[in-house]
Amino acid sequence: MPKIKTNRSTAKRFKLTGTGRLVRGCSHKSHILTKKSSKRKRGLRQPKLTDRRDEGRIRKLLAI
């Protein structure tokens, strides 16, 4: 049985925390920033934890 390859696009988007949770970046921060408030843009800089319901699928893509 061959090893499962890591999905590279997923590997670039998600990182594993020390406790084993998955961290992702925020969407909607690349363009059309003039109409977004400073508070909203500041919040989009912070990494977010992925939802527990999605973690299984993401882990399968990451082959972990």
Image (spheres, rainbow, N blue to C red):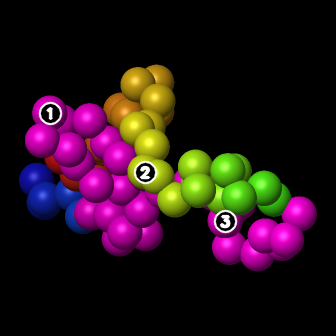
Q: Is residue 13 left or right of residue 37?
A: left
Q: Position of residue 19 (x, y in %)?
A: 14, 33
Q: How far across and how far down the image is residue 16, in percent? A: 23, 48
- Residue at position x 46%, y 52% in the image: 46
Residue drawn at (78%, 70%), measured in percent from left and top? 33
The label shown at residue 53 is: none
Q: Residue at x 71, y 58 (%)?
A: 38
Main secondary structure of the magenta stretch:
loop
Mark 1 highlights which residue? 19
Where is residue 17 drawn, in percent x and y?
Answer: 20, 44
- Give the amino acid type for the residue marked by disc 2 in the picture: Pro
The residue range painted magenta reads 6-35
Q: CA distance from mark 3 to mark 2?
A: 12 Å
Q: Amino acid at mark 3?
A: Lys
Q: Within the image, what quadrant is residue 6 found in? A: bottom left
Q: Is residue 34 above or below residue 17?
A: below
Callout 3 environment at 10 Å: few (<14), some (14 to 19), or many (20+)? some
Q: CA distance from mark 1 to mark 2?
A: 15 Å
Q: Which residue is mark 2?
A: 47
- The one of 39 and 31 positioned closer to us in this rendering: 39
Position of 48 with respect to 63 (left or right) is: right
Say which element carries label 3.
Answer: loop
Give me the residue at 41% from left, 25% from top. Answer: 52
| Residue 7 visible in this rendered orientation of the protein | no
Helix, strand, or loop for circle 1? loop
Query: From mark 1 to mark 3, how far is it between C-alphas?
Result: 27 Å
Helix, strand or loop at mark 2: loop
Q: Is residue 27 magenta?
A: yes
Residues marked 1 and 2 touching at CB (< 8 Å): no
- Residue 29 image label: 3
**Left or right, residue 26 beside residue 30:** left
Q: Earlier in the sequence, mark 1 or mark 3?
A: 1
